[in-house]
Image (cartoon, grey):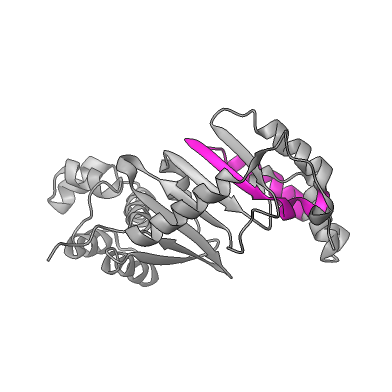
Amino acid sequence: MTKASPCLPALLALSASLRGARTAEGLGLRRLAHKLGVSAQALSLWETGKRAPAIEDVAHVLGFLRVSPEEYDRVMRLRRHLEDPISIEALGAGSTSHRRALEELAVRTFEWAPHVVPEPLQTTEYIRAIAQDRAAAPDDLDQAIFEHQVRQLDQGWTGHRTVLVGAAALAPAIEPQLQALRAASNFPGLAIRIVPPAVAKTIDAFTIYEGQGSAFTVALRHQDNIIFVSEPDAVQGYRSTFKALERGSVTCADFRPGPSCETP
């Protein structure tokens, strides 16, 4: 029977966890490899996600570095489920985030945002309008805008990114947000298109990450979790859906808001 390939997000999270445990102890890669009795090349491959370490090797590394029992259980759980075609991560999982690792390593990214403009592209007016709809207190509103600006500085675009924004997502602040999207469309490696209401399908937001060697992973947000799917047939279905939406989309410059884009 053919062995399943490691799930890319889980493999990246595992590699980041091993690397983080080593650096937390102030050990260089070669020094740790020598103490573990493994080659520096093997350890490097484990820490960069280019090769999946055996369960025994993961336990050996974590045990030598004396990580906390909670961290030990978390990382070992990652390794045990490495071949699962689906992995789940709680939002705000920190530096070993599956999503962050995919963002950094993706060659190309395809994002469908039917209801909310992606956070790095949101304007201050857009955030303010959303907060006002939720009856946020002034102090909470200022804090939300500040946190958004910090995240914008922290999250740059890597590789080539295509973003399809549903026309309904513009509703909180149509004109300023549309102007911002038109300006952002000029950024190198970033393509933004608007999907009119007549074309938009009743499918929730998703992001497709393409890594080296045409390895694809789909990220789906569900409540407080992100679900990562690498099963080939499921990935192909999302890729086909994205292409269909893209065919019916228009450029930001050509899009003209209509009544259907207004907030009810």
Residue at x-position 30% and y-position 48%: 49
Q: Viewer-proximal residue, 207 or 81? A: 207
Relative vertical location of residue 156 with respect to residue 60 in this rendering, above or below: above
Residue at x-position 37% and y-position 66%: 86
Tell me if 203 is positioned left or right of 179 in this view.
Answer: left
Q: Where is residue 156 in the image (x, y as percent from the top left)?
A: 56, 38
* Residue 156 lies within the magenta run: yes
Relative vertical location of residue 36 with respect to residue 162 in this rendering, above or below: below
Q: Viewer-proximal residue, 194 or 120? A: 194
**Which corner quadrant of the image does residue 249 belong to?**
top right
Can you say which quadrant of the picture contains the N terminus?
Answer: bottom left
Q: Position of residue 79 (x, y in %)?
A: 28, 64
Residue at x-position 55% and y-position 61%: 92
Relative vertical location of residue 210 with respect to residue 70 in this rendering, above or below: above
Tell me if 189 is positioned left or right of 213 in this view.
Answer: right
Can you say which quadrant of the picture contains the C terminus?
Answer: bottom right
Q: Position of residue 87 (x, y in %)?
A: 39, 66
**Which corner quadrant of the image does residue 18 belong to?**
bottom left
* Residue 88 lies within the magenta run: no
Q: Viewer-proximal residue, 242 or 219? A: 242
**Number of numbered discs visible in the structure rendering:** 0
Secondary structure, magenta segment, majority class: helix
* Magenta highlight range: 144-173
